[in-house]
Image (spheres, grey):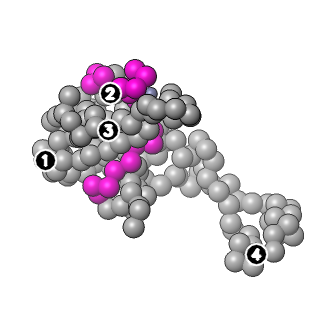
Amino acid sequence: MGMYDYIHIAPSIIRDCTIKCHACGHLAAPDGWQTKDFENCMELYSLDRDNTNTARMFKVDPPEQKYWVPYTKEEIEEYNNSSNLKWLQRKEGDGYYTKEGWEVYNRRKRFMGELPHQMVRTYLICENCIYEDKPPRGWIEIEIKFTDGVAVKITQLEEGKII
Ligand SMILES: [Zn+2]
């Protein structure tokens, strides 16, 4: 259905594996990696090292309650007066999480035990050349092999070929 999940990749892993754009040579960004190999429901995962320096996938929790900001009465009124859409009206108790709350570093990461145990393919468009109007725009695509929850191999792909 066109859904996917996100993966955050620790910058140290990107550096150590030299995951970079083949179009411009820019090192890959840690955020924005998409995959269709999990549940495809817009969850966030994190590829990082545990306290024994082993690379693993972690499941990232939603933002914590302390980052929740409820709208004030005035904000609710102002918004509702400016919108005619009934189903989009704000009510008391509505609010939002701050940008800080969404940061992966401020969210709890769950240990996934022996999962995943599979190949995981993930990709993003290079943040350095995404806005260039002529090709090549850099697609960065990697395949991670997990054995009993441990990332044992990361392979970068280019145009379907293993490089
Ligand atoms: Zn690039």
Residue position marked by numbered label 4 in the rendering = 85
Q: CA distance from mark 3 to mark 1?
A: 22 Å
Identified by mark 1, the residue type is Asp
Position of residue 19 measured from the top left corner of the image (x, y, whole percent)? 32, 27
Position of residue 71 measured from the top left corner of the image (x, y, whole percent)? 75, 60
Residue position marked by numbered label 2 in the rendering = 19
Q: CA distance from mark 4 to mark 1?
A: 49 Å
Among numbered discs 3 and 2, the one appearing first in the sequence:
2
In which quadrant is the C terminus drawn?
top left
Among numbered discs 1 and 2, the one appearing first in the sequence:
2
Q: CA distance from mark 2 to mark 4?
A: 45 Å
Of marks 1 and 2, the one in the foreground = 2
User: Is residue 117 on the magenta stretch?
Assistant: no
Position of residue 150 measured from the top left corner of the image (x, y, whole percent)? 17, 40
Identified by mark 4, the residue type is Leu
Q: Quadrant of ligand 1?
A: top left
Do the CB atoms of the residues marked 3 and 1 lie less than 8 Å apart? Answer: no
Q: Which mark is residue 148?
A: 1
SS class of the residue under badge 4? loop
Residue position marked by numbered label 3 in the rendering = 141
Q: Image point 65% across, 57% down: which residue?
A: 96
Q: 55 or 93: nearer the eye? A: 55
Residue farthest along the front direction in this orientation: 134
Among numbered discs 3 and 1, the one appearing first in the sequence:
3
Q: 25 or 45: nearer the eye? A: 25
Which quadrant would residue 143 be assigned to in this image? Answer: top left
Q: Which residues are magenta?
A: 16-38
Identified by mark 3, the residue type is Glu
Among numbered discs 4 and 1, the one appearing first in the sequence:
4
Residue labelled 3 has its Cβ within 8 Å of some atom of ligand 1: no
Crowd tier of the residue under label 4, counting other residues whose Cα lies within 10 Å: few below 14, some 14–19, many 20 or above: few
Q: CA distance from mark 1 to mark 2?
A: 23 Å
